[in-house]
Image: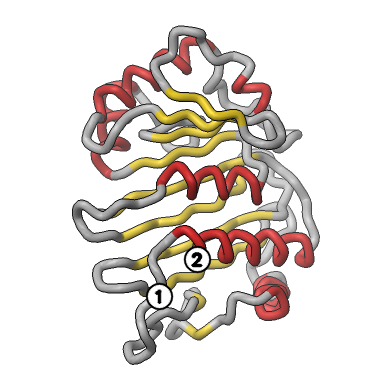
Amino acid sequence: MRRVVRAFWGPRPESVETLAGRWKRTLDGITGLLPAPASPGGAGAGTWRQAHGTGPETELPADEGALLGALRVARTAEDWSDLTGTALRLDRTGEAGWRTETSGLAGGSPEFLLQSFVVTLHAPDGADVPEAELLALLAREWEPDFGDVSDDDVLDALEDDAGYSVGDPVVGRVGYLSPARAALLPEDLKAAREELTGGGVLLRVAAAGASADVVAAYEQLRDAGALEPLPRPMDRPVL
């Protein structure tokens, strides 16, 4: 089953050294939460590999020095802009049926494009995936404005039944809201709440397959103002 764990925020200029530290802690956290990587033997088995715009993937050790080097190279690309942010994409094959893809766009100061970190997980059907823990990890390491755990069925239901548009603040089966958004949570929201360091809140909204419950929670949060988009042009990372 494919699922995505996502975090989004507004403009927040950061150095490559700061980004490398965030990336390193995030990859360490993912490694600690997911099954051990596959034994060496297949291409990319158990090893983080960097995806490039052209050409094959290359191995990239998950240490701060290697990540710093990759981020510096990204900033020398012909189309790089300090407004857009610095992009990096890594993936890793785990044990049978598991694959983890990560992509980040961070450190920039765009007025209209959200910064983001996304983990796409491919896991065997019925596998126990620590979705909430992964979203909490992204919340801790990237200090986002909002985040979610979703799959294709959830996103389709939100678009078809609730008018959700890509780029709007959203919650999925699990959601994260920054402190200002969390302050607007309706008291009767049917979701388990966990306050995280920094004042943000993790919401456990629904079980897998319960897309209708996610739609209902999304509409309730939107009506309460907790999913109001950042003002455009954006001038801050969080609401």
Instruction: Depth check: give the residue in front, 53 or 92.
Output: 92
Crowd rating for badge 1 (residues with CA inside 10 Å; few <14, some 14–19, many 20+) = some
Depicted 169 relative to depicted 135: above or below:
above
| Residue 38 in the image, given as x and y percentages of width and height | 35, 79
Residue 113 visible, this angle: no
- Residue pictured at 51% horizontal, 63% vertical: 32
Marker disc for residue 31 = 2
Crowd rating for badge 2 (residues with CA inside 10 Å; few <14, some 14–19, many 20+) = some
Residue ID for mark 1 = 37
Mark 2–mark 1 Cα distance, whole angstroms, equals 8 Å
- Residue pictured at 47% horizontal, 29% vertical: 203
- Residue pictured at 31% horizontal, 73% vertical: 95
Sequence order check, earlier mark of 2 and 1: 2
Q: Are marks 2 and 1 in contact (CB under 8 Å)?
A: yes
Q: Is residue 59 left or right of residue 97?
A: right
- Place residue 111 in its image quadrant: top right
- For the residue marked with disc 2, what is the amino acid? Thr
